[in-house]
Amino acid sequence: MKYMLIMRQTDEALAAAKTADTEALINAMGQFNESMVKAGVLLDGDGLSDPSEGFVVDFSGPSPVLTDGPYGETHELFNGFWTIQVSSKEEAAEWAKRAPLSPGQKLEVRRITDMSDFEDFADNEYVRSEEEWRELSAKLRESGDS
Amino acid sequence: MDTRRAVDAVWRIESARIVASLVRVVGDVGWAEDLAQEALVDAVLQWPESGVPQNPGAWLTAVAKRKAIDGWRRQERLDDRYAAIAHELSETAESEFEPIDDDVLRLVFISCHPVLSREAQIAMTLRIIGGLTTDEIGRLFLQPVATVQQRIVRAKRTLSAAQVPFETPEPAEWKERLASVLGVVYLIFTEGYSATSGDSWMRTDLANEALRLGRKLAGLVPREPEVHGLVALMEFQASRFAARVTPSGEPILLSEQDRSRWDHRQIARGSTALARADALGRGRGTYALQAAIAQVHATAPTYEDTDWERIVLLYEALGRLAPNPVVELNRAVAVSFATGPASALIIVDELVAGGALAGSHLLPSVRAELLTRLGRPDEARVEYLRAAELTRNERERAVLLAKAR
């Protein structure tokens, strides 16, 4: 199963990070990443740039509205993620606990949905692809009879 | 969270490192693994009270080492080794637990040592390197837990009896021993990719386990092109999982798969791994060549628009490097699309005449496809029925019988 570890931090933590020892942070992150690569669990990961470079698209009104940061009442901002493939929720938790983060920072850990999440639903595309397959195998049978 | 599951999660992550650092001290893989297991039992009992320690791997290793000392004390062998460990335990803070990768690599080679049977190599690798519980291994291989346990106990005794040293192979043996390790990983993968037993055609959990082992191995021996080749091959093949079966479990052939359902991020990871193998500049081995073939399929827009001529070339290279009737059969399939079914049938008939693959369903099923395309349905039907008779997989049999109708 795949999990996404999503980094979130408060404005205060973001400000603190700006005065921190960047090289030490890079090294700590590098070691954490390397440990997950060597364990064979890391699939993907990226950091996000400063929120001042970003913007928000708000769908509350009749048409989407673009707003530059800061984002009003939002107190914790996403600033990066890892995607890992592990064998249990507990293992995802164990990796998350090892992330080199500091006060004001949090990891939100979410399972990434897969095929099995949609088995119980008559998902349209799913049903359609099965129908296509059945049609095709029926055709193959016909051609075999001819 | 449940403590047992938390302990299992720690074992999953730390098993190889814990056992490796214990073998370094006690000198015997079997005893090291037993000590680690005893430490896990302590963890299950103590962690609900004390909480999961800050560095659980170091905690487990320290507890296991104390048990080693107790063992020696009982045997009254309080020699230099005891003194060394006692010193180490008092000097080393738990946070400094940092076993070296070389020890983990030694452990990989021991788990796949030639004195062990293939089944034992697989069980040991999944248990110690992969960090699976015996329950999990039993579930993955559809075997009783007692069988798996027995296999591991015997494997540990065999290693002890053979006095297998805790060393990586000598340069002269290196290539062969590494091939054996890669073979174990790929065997686990193929059992998951195309299950030979059970009523399900693939077992993705098992294949994912092999992928994880492969990636781990690539971290341990990054200068070995074939390790990256194997990882690439497994990534490409696994990228098709979602498209390979219908919701009710019937297999879907490559030609009929919905390519939008392939995992394109996984395909990209496969390409990265293959590029890593190529970048080492020592040519492509058998895994890298198979990966390259899988890559051509993975990046083709449709089955018809596949670069079949390139695939034929890659199969020719593969066949020369490692002559094998299955490779030859696959080359025949590629030739049938690059040149035509008639030239392919010649290759297949040569295989039949040579007596290769006599008991396999592959030969008659490919022959059946070619005969169908050549407009010889009666002969094709006979071959489909023969293939259905020979396959051991129920799902596949159903598909072959459907085609024979």
Image: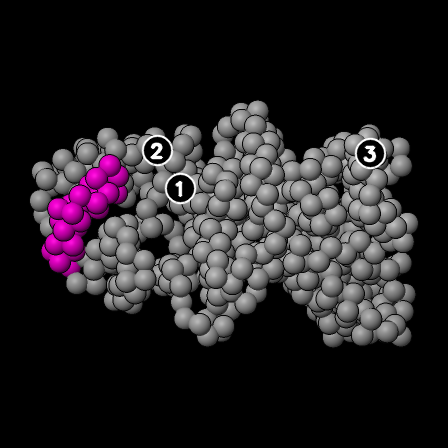
Question: Where is residue B205 drawn, in percent x and y?
Answer: 53, 41
Is disc 1 in the same subunit as disc 2?
A: yes
Around disc 3, counting alpha carbons within 10 Å, would you say few (fewer than 14), some (14 to 19), or many (20 or more)?
A: few
Q: Mark 2 lies on which chain?
A: B
Could you tell me which secondary element the residue under label 1 belongs to? loop
Dots 1, 2 in contact, CB < 8 A: yes
Q: In this view, does A79 lie to the left or right of B87?
A: left
Which residues fall within the magenta stretch?
Answer: B340-367
| Residue B343 lies in the magenta stretch | yes
User: Where is mark 3, residue-wise?
Assistant: B76
Identify the residue under disc 2: B393
Contact between labelled residues 3 and 2, with CB atoms less than 8 Å apart = no
- The residue that mark 1 highlights is B194
| Magenta stretch: includes residue A25 | no
The chain under label 1 reads: B
Amino acid on which disc 1 is placed:
Ser
The answer to which of marks 1 and 2 sits earlier in the sequence is 1
Query: Could you tell me which residue is drawn at 57 percent across and 65 percent down?
Result: B222
Q: How far apart are marks 2 and 3 (CA)?
A: 56 Å
